[in-house]
C-alpha cells in the first residue's frame, strides 16, 4: 500500500462533459505502478479537490482510496503547515517559515485521517509505504492501530540539520511520528545522519550509525535511497522522430541560435531562478553571449499559486525578465524566452533535446529530477549540465559543471566555462553522468527500498482489526 498526499490520478473533465480520472505523469507513479499491480496494491491519497468525497475505486487495475479534505484543511494542512512551515524550514530557511498552532492542529487531524483509512484497508501483514513531508505523523499513528504492518517512509525533500529543525515547536512530535516506521528513507546520507542525531538528542533513544533502538525492543533504520527517473522511458521518447522534429521546431522558433540554454523548474523560491537569470543577463551585458546567437529559455511551471510567497516570486521574476529583455534584447531577439506554463512529457523531452546547456541552480533541493531527465535525453552524449552543488543530484553526478547559486560571479564563470568547453570534454562528462542515471533508475530505487524494508521486518504479528476495502 502507498500512502501519499495525492492520488496517482488527477480529476479531469472528459470530452462528454463528465468528470473522470487521468493518470498523473510523475516518475513516482511510473516507478511504483508495476510493484502495485504485481502485489494487488492500493494507493491512499487526496484527489486534489477540496470538499470532494469519493468512494474507493479501481482505475486501470489500481485500487485507489481517496481521502477528503475541507477547504480549511487545504489552507491549514497543505498550504499552511506543509508548505508554509515545513517546506521552507527543510530547505535551509530560504524563505522564513511560519509557526501557527492552528496549522499544526490541522496537520495532526489530516495525518490521523490518512492513518485511520490506511489501517482500515490494509491487509494482514501488509507493507505500507508512506511518502513525504506532508504525512510525517502517519507512521506512528498507523503503528498504534496496526502493529502487524511493515511500515516504510520516504522523505523526498531535504531533512535539515539540527540547528534549523530545532526551531520547529513540534520537533519531538515529528521525530516520534517518523519513528513509527521500520525504515525511514532519505535522499542523502547527510539527511539520514541529521535525523538519527536529532532522535538521540531530542527524543533520547539509543542510536548506532543508521539504527535507532526503541525502548520496546523495536529498531528503526534511517538510510539514504537517492530517487531517480524512468531513464529508459525518457531516452525512448528523446529518440523518437516526433521529439526530434519538435526539437528542430523549437530551435527554429528561437531563430536557430548557435547556443540554447535551458532552465525548467517549478516556480518556487528554492529553485534559484532569479540569480540564474541575473547571471546570464550579466554575461550578455559583458559581451560573453550575444542575443543574435544565444538565448536562455526559462520554463517556470505554476506552483502553489494561492500562497502569497509564490505570487510575490512570480511578480519578481516577471519584472526581472521584462527588465532584462527591455535593456538587452532586440526586436525578435529576447535575452530570456520565458514561459510560465506546464508542459507534457513529450514537450519536455523536446526542450531537453533542443538545449545545448541545461542550467539547474536550486538553493536547496532534495534531488532535482530535471537534471537527470536532461541527462537521460542526451543519448548522443552531447550537451552540458550546469548544476547547483546544493541539489541532491550533485552528489551522484559529480561530472556536471557544479556551481554555488549564492555566488553569481562564480555562476557566471562556470556557465561560460561550460559554453566554451569542447565536444570531447562535454562527451566525457555526459557519458559518466548517463551511466549513473542508467544504472540507477527509479525502478531500482523502488525495489531497493522495498527489499530493504522486507529484510528489516520479515515477521509479523496478528492485526488488531480486520482489513477491508470499503
Image (cartoon, rainbow, N blue to C red):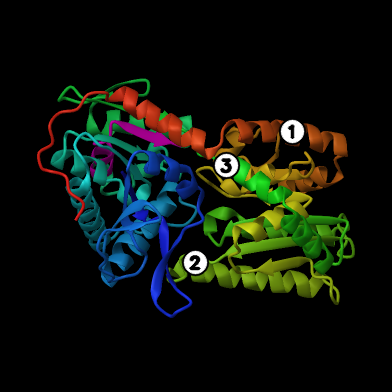
Q: In which quarter of the image is residue 152?
A: top left
Q: Nearer the viewer, mark 3 or mark 1?
A: 1
Which span of residues is magenta-colored? 173-186
Label 1 sits on residue: 431
Residue furthest to the bottom in view is 17
The residue carrying pointer 2 sits among few (fewer than 14), some (14 to 19) or many (20 or more) residues within 10 Å by Cα, namely some
| Left or right of 5 on screen, residue 254 | right
Q: Residue at x 52, y 70 (%)?
A: 312
Q: Report x, y in % for residue 252.
A: 84, 65
Q: What whole-number distance in Å separates the C-alpha atoms at marks 3 and 2?
A: 21 Å
Q: Which of 4 and 275 is in front in this view?
A: 4
Mark linked to residue 143: none
Label 2 sits on residue: 310
Q: What element carries label 2?
A: helix
Of pointers 3 and 2, the one earlier in the residue sequence: 2
Q: Residue at x 23, y 33 (%)?
A: 203
Quarter that holds the N terminus: top left
Of pointers 2 and 1, the one earlier in the residue sequence: 2
Q: Residue at x 37, y 24 (%)?
A: 210
Label 3 sits on residue: 390
Q: What whole-number distance in Å separates the C-alpha atoms at marks 3 and 1?
A: 22 Å
Q: What whole-number distance in Å separates the C-alpha atoms at marks 2 and 1?
A: 37 Å
Discs 3, 2 touching: Cβ within 8 Å: no
Q: Nearer the viewer, residue 20 or 105?
A: 20
The residue carrying pointer 1 sits among few (fewer than 14), some (14 to 19) or many (20 or more) residues within 10 Å by Cα, namely some
Q: Which of 103 and 146 is in front in this view?
A: 146
| Left or right of 153 on screen, residue 30 | right
Amino acid at each position: 500500500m502507498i500512502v501519499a498526499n495525492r492520488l496517482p490520478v488527477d480529476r479531469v473533465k472528459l470530452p462528454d462533459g463528465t468528470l473522470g480520472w487521468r493518470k498523473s505523469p510523475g516518475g513516482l507513479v511510473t516507478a511504483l505502478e508495476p510493484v502495485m499491480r504485481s502485489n494487488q496494491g492500493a494507493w491512499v491519497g487526496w484527489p486534489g479537490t477540496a470538499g470532494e468525497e469519493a468512494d474507493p475505486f479501481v482505475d486501470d487495475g489500481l485500487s485507489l482510496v481517496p481521502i477528503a479534505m475541507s477547504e480549511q484543511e487545504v489552507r491549514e494542512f497543505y498550504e499552511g503547515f506543509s508548505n508554509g512551515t515545513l517546506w521552507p524550514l527543510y530547505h535551509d530557511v530560504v524563505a522564513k517559515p511560519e509557526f501557527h498552532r492552528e496549522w499544526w492542529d490541522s496537520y495532526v487531524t489530516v495525518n490521523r485521517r490518512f492513518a485511520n483509512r490506511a489501517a482500515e484497508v490494509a491487509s494482514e501483514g501488509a507493507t505500507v509505504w508512506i511518502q513525504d513531508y506532508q504525512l510525517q505523523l502517519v507512521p506512528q499513528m498507523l503503528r498504534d492501530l496496526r502493529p502487524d504492518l511493515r511500515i516504510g517512509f520516504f522523505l523526498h525533500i531535504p531533512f535539515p540539520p539540527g540547528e534549523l529543525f530545532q526551531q520547529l515547536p513540534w520537533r519531538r512530535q515529528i521525530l516520534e511520528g517518523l519513528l513509527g516506521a521500520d525504515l525511514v528513507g532519505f535522499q542523502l546520507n547527510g539527511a539520514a545522519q541529521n535525523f538519527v542525531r536529532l532522535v538521540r538528542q531530542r527524543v533520547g533513544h539509543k542510536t548506532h550509525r543508521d539504527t535507532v533502538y526503541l525502548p520496546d525492543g523495536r529498531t528503526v533504520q534511517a538510510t539514504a535511497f537517492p530517487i531517480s527517473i524512468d531513464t529508459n522511458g525518457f531516452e525512448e521518447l528523446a529518440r523518437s522522430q516526433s521529439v526530434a522534429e519538435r526539437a528542430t521546431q523549437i530551435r527554429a522558433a528561437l531563430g536557430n541560435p548557435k547556443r540554447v540554454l535551458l532552465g525548467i523548474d517549478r516556480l518556487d523560491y528554492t529553485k534559484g531562478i532569479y540569480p540564474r537569470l541575473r547571471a546570464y543577463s550579466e554575461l550578455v551585458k559583458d559581451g560573453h553571449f550575444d542575443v543574435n546567437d544565444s538565448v536562455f529559455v526559462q520554463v517556470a511551471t505554476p506552483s502553489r499559486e494561492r500562497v502569497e510567497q509564490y505570487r510575490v516570486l512570480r511578480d519578481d521574476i516577471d519584472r526581472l525578465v521584462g527588465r532584462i529583455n527591455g535593456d538587452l534584447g532586440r526586436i525578435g531577439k529576447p535575452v530570456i524566452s520565458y514561459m510560465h506554463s506546464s508542459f507534457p512529457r513529450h514537450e519536455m523531452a523536446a526542450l531537453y533535446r533542443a538545449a545545448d546547456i541545461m542550467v539547474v541552480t536550486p538553493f536547496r533541493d532534495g534531488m532535482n529530477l530535471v537534471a537527470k531527465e536532461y541527462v537521460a535525453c542526451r543519448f548522443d552524449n552531447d550537451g552540458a549540465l550546469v548544476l547547483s552543488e546544493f541539489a541532491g543530484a550533485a552528489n551522484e553526478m559529480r561530472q556536471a559543471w557544479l556551481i554555488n547559486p549564492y555566488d553569481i560571479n562564480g555562476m557566471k564563470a562556470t556557465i561560460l566555462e561550460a559554453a566554451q568547453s569542447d565536444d570531447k570534454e562535454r562527451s566525457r562528462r555526459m557519458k559518466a553522468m548517463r551511466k549513473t542515471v542508467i544504472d540507477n533508475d527509479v525502478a531500482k530505487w523502488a525495489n531497493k527500498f522495498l527489499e530493504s524494508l522486507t529484510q528489516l521486518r520479515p515477521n509479523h504479528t496478528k492485526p488488531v482489526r480486520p482489513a477491508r476495502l470499503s
